[in-house]
Amino acid sequence: MKVTLAGRVVNVAAGDLVDIEIRRTVRVRLLECHVADPATTPGIDARAKLIDITFGRPVELDVELDDLDLLKRGWGSGRVRTLGPNGVDVAAVMVADGFAVARKGK
């Protein structure tokens, strides 16, 4: 079972890692998306793309119910979607635009 939380992206740490302010800021690894090492040119380009898609925007975060303790821990994995009329599945855009490769699971 999944739970959806609303928040805002306040930092992009890497091409597949964002900080979302919900009740507190939590670091979220995008599900089904993997990018190159953040110290490489592809990793830097992926982070720039993720900033463009998400930074400062309202988002929804889907997490598995058993991973809801990410609010206590401060980090976890989930599916992130931007909100609004042009809302997108962030991982799907990163993969479709060539900034990440698809991966299953966490």
Image (cartoon, rainbow, N blue to C red):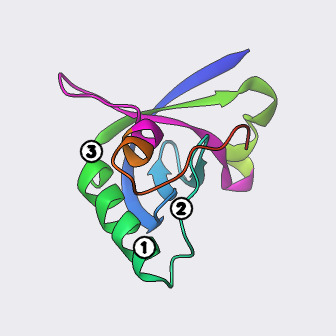
Q: Is residue 60 left or right of residue 33?
A: left
* Residue 87 image point, x, y percent: 27, 28
**Residue 81 occupies quadrant:** top left
Q: Classify mark 1: residues with Cα within 10 Å, few (<14), some (14-19) or many (20+).
A: some
- Residue that carries the numbered disc 1 in the rendered image: 42
- The answer to whether residue 72 is left or right of residue 55 is right
Give the quadrant of the N terminus: top right
Residue drawn at x 51%, y 85% as measured from the top left: 39
The correct choice, above or below, for 13 with respect to 73 in the image is below
Q: Residue at x 60, y 52 (%)?
A: 29
Residue drawn at x 57%, y 75% is 37
Under mark 1, the amino acid is Pro
Left or right: residue 86 versus residue 11 is left
**Residue drawn 46% across the image and 73% down it:** 43
Q: Which residues are magenta?
A: 73-92
The quadrant the C terminus occupies is top right
Residue 35 circle label: 2
- Callout 3, which amino acid? Arg
Q: Which mark is residue 57?
A: 3
- Residue at the farthest right position: 66
